[in-house]
Image: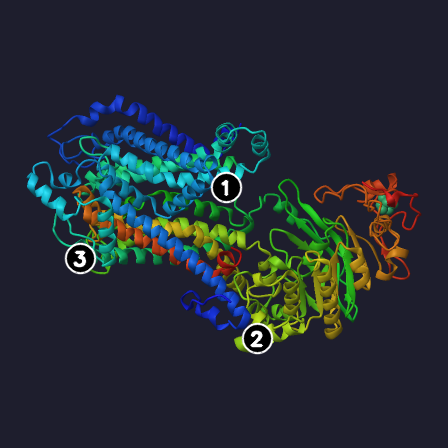
Amino acid sequence: MGGWTPAAVPPSAARGLRGRAGDLWSHRWLRFALRRAGRLLVSLWVLVTASFLMIHLVPGDPVRAALGPTAPAELVLARTRDLGLLDPLWRQYAGFLGNLLRGELGVSISTRLPVGETIAQRLPATAQLAVAAFLLSVLVAVPVGVVMAVITRRGKGRRTELAFTGTNVVLGAIPDFLVGVGLVYLLAVQTHLFPVAGRAGPDSYVLPVLALAIGPCAVLSRIVRVEMLAVMEADYIRTARAKRLTPWRVQLVHALPNAVTASLTLGGLLLSSLVAGTVLVENVFAWPGLGSTIVSSIVSKDYPLVQGTVLIYGVGVLLINTLVDVVLALLDPRSTIGES
Amino acid sequence: MRAARVLLRPVGFAGFGLLTVVLLVAVFGPVLWDGRATVIDTGDLLAGPSGEHWIGTDNLGRDLFFRVLVATRLSITLALAATAIGMVLGVVLGAAPMLTGRRVARFITSAVNVLVAFPGLLLVLFFAVVFGVGARGAALAVGLAGAPAFARLCHTLLSGVSERDYIAAARIAGVSKFRILVRHALPNIAEPLIVNATMAAGGVLLTFSGLSFLGLGVQAPSYDWGKLMQDGLNGIYVHPLAALGPGIAVVLAGLAFNLTGEAFAAAFGIDVIPGVARVRAVRGAAGESAGPAVAAPDPEPGTVLSVDGLRVTIPGARRPIHAVRGVTFAIRDGEAVGVVGESGSGKSVTALAVARLIEEPVRVDANHLVFAGEDLMAADDPASLRKRLGTSLVVVFQDPMTSFNPAHRVGPQLAEVGRFHQGLGRRAAFARAVDRLHAVKLREPERRARQYPFEFSGGMRQRAMIGMGLMGTPRLIIADEPTTALDVTVQRQVLALLGEVRGDTGAALLLISHDVSVVTEVCDRVLVMYAGLIVEELPARDLGTLARHPYTRALVAAVPDMETDLTRPLAVIPGTPVDPSDVPAGCAFAARCPLADDHCRAVEPPLQADAAGNRVACHKAGWPLPADSAEVTV
Ligand code: SF4
């Protein structure tokens, strides 16, 4: 029977596989892996093609726009030739794809530096910010959501519930860059607790990470609470209680995994928007990452640099989405693999 | 009207009021205050807040407070324009699959799906590159970036309504696809679309101010809130209000849209959080006493379960629902007792209450409830009690498909009992779980134990559920309709298994069922429940011959047997069961009883025991029924 892709099988599942059942298992996981990989590839292709077309969609002469109206015509022509914009479209596309495969992203119009180099230099700062904010929001949102669900279950703790949802709606409605501005005002200007801007010691991370994490954290904790409440009414929770397990074990071992599964589906989008959120927050804190790069390159019409950064952001988001799906599949094999 | 209801909620009122203010300022702001917002005061550059300039001035000495007010119009206009672009494009993309052929439809849907996966801001930046920096480019960018999400929403909503009868009818009548869409489908999804557009407008407003803040949106000399914030950020040390002022305006306006949208969504019934019952009448119900206080007699020796005066009260929106109204019975060691009744008679609630599986705010009271010498009504459940209950009181639930946790493998779910109540290690507990699965005759228990519940059939899950009970040494098995969800041959197997298990362990059985023939076959004694009370108790083998309560006799008559003429419709008990929130005075069965008279309707018949220990609650117990009354069909 079916093939076997070790990469797609979680170690815990692989242990139990034997004989016919093993075939069935691997079959399911194989189908899931193929389907998910297919979607990733299609999305990647859309992303790459879109970022290729971007420069062609710009009305007028992009190079002229980039170099300004005073630049001599020869210079514009030379740059246009450098960028390969004189070739037929299909050859440009092929060249673009070939370069990408070799890891080359072109050369910046304004700085004449290879785009890949700039990105490599800037990416770590952004990635650190995003990962830290992601971890922080999950680590705070899940316990808060669970505790709020337990406290406010079945109409208990009306006041607490009202306060929680109220705070949540407000926090969720304030965009991250505004949170950033507010934090700068409160914790840097007023109290001098943290540096206002820039990236230096560990304390310079506090404000940008907080600014990024607060919004997603509010939304995520609300989702976790609602899912917990729904899961706590499920039949299998009653079964767990009939086994006379401690309330803690019922909530954490039996309810939480199911609630997290459902929350992840909704929270996945939130987390990829967190990556995009770095753009604004970096600009508030003059953070030397990709976010400030993409904005300044859009303003200065440095198209190769824009192309490169858009690609990197897009790939980051796609990878996160894929990761979320795989985690989901591991947590709840039925929903993703079994019955589809 | 719905709109009126929206205003009655605090959220709706706040949101709508705020939105009105914002829109008024947007319309009249520039007319009223443009002069004060543009007047240059060179003597007062970059000033902090003062009596004259509430939030200070900018680098040309212009009053920032009025600039924020005047900026409302541009900010709101751009946000609404971008929302409109996104919505129109989204509806076109979302509706297109209904009009086009299958191929094109699938292409559009999957393209939308790919685009939706990218966060909005990234799409905005992409389009901002294409359309260039500036207000118009930014509006287009934000609008286009919002289109995929709207398309997805519109598509989902449309597929919801396209199943409806009137659309199917129009299709069969040959109405053109376009006409169906415009005349029948779109008007039906207008409400949720508009609600979502309102909320989206709030989001767009924030995104737009973000763009202007980055310098990609509105350019000087025009200004919106984002632009004002960008200008203010540099001076945040000196006077932070210059940056915070426009920020507060953005948040307030965003909230105005969001809250209004949310209030409308709530009014349309879109936002329902499960598991939260509207509990208001609880307090009143909680104060009730648990019937006449009879000194709890010590249960006879050899009794595994003794229940006296059990009542279950569910707080309702208007008045409490009395699901069980005072039930008294006992089960001896090894005995099998059946509880029959229609749904809503309180039999399942009784089972759950006895097992102490009913949670707040539903209230359980009893004069006493003793299982194997343990007082289950004692205030708390200490660890020791949990341990004993966990190994000696087994509950088998009705729906095996939903009673196993989908997130865990089956074996560990059984093993939990061993690990937490029997002091076994992880491995030993798992080995015992495998052994128990073997005991309930599951083939290949090793392999099965490592599978997830969704890989089991219904019958296998019910076996595994019984196996879970066998982890300990059960003294009582409470089975709540254990075979109802299974097909007939599997039902027999599961019942046979229950019988074997009882033979092996000597456990007593409390079997809840609506199926009289199952109970007659399996049980020694039968309790018949109606409207939250026991109306008759008698040996199971006498059910067909010695039943005296008219309800019991009607139940028995409704069971098809060898002599039933299958060409005639099956007998059903006429009338509908009592509404547990509104139990009439007198005998609850009177409305459906062929023997009922005024005395029945006025005085509740007490449950009385005869010499043999059988009990019945009826003023006319054992009277002959009028001919053909049990044969009435509905
Ligand atoms: S008490 Fe009266 S109404 Fe009730 S069951 Fe007996 S005869 Fe019928």
Chain under disc 2: B
SS of the residue at dot 3? helix
State left or right for residue B188 relative to residue A141: right
Q: Do the residues bearing badges 1 and 2 touch, measured as CB atoms within 8 Å?
A: no
Q: Which residue is mark 3?
A: A117
Chain under disc 1: B
Q: Which mark is residue B429?
A: 2
B471 and B530: which one is in front? B471
Q: Do the residues bearing badges 3 and 2 touch, measured as CB atoms within 8 Å?
A: no
Count of residue discs: 3
- Mark-to-mark CA distance, 3 and 2: 56 Å
- Mark-to-mark CA distance, 1 and 2: 44 Å
Residue type at numbered disc 3: Glu
Does mark 3 fall on the same chain as mark 1?
A: no
B525 and B79: which one is in front? B79
Residue type at numbered disc 1: Asp
State left or right for residue B332 relative to residue A131: right
Up the image or down, B459 lies above or below A86; here it is below
Q: Which mark is residue A329?
A: none
Q: Does mark 3 have its CB less than 8 Å from ligand 1?
A: no
SS of the residue at dot 2? helix
Up the image or down, A251 lies above or below B606; here it is below
Q: Which residue is mark 1?
A: B271
Residue A106 pos. (x, y %): 18, 52
Does mark 2 fall on the same chain as mark 1?
A: yes
Does mark 2 fall on the same chain as mark 3?
A: no
Question: Residue placed farthest to the top in the image?
Answer: B31
Residue B27 appears in view: yes
Residue A332 pos. (x, y %): 49, 60
Residues packed near mark 3 inside 10 Å, few (<14), some (14 to 19) or many (20 plus) = some
State left or right for residue B66 relative to residue A259: left
Residue A68 pos. (x, y %): 11, 38
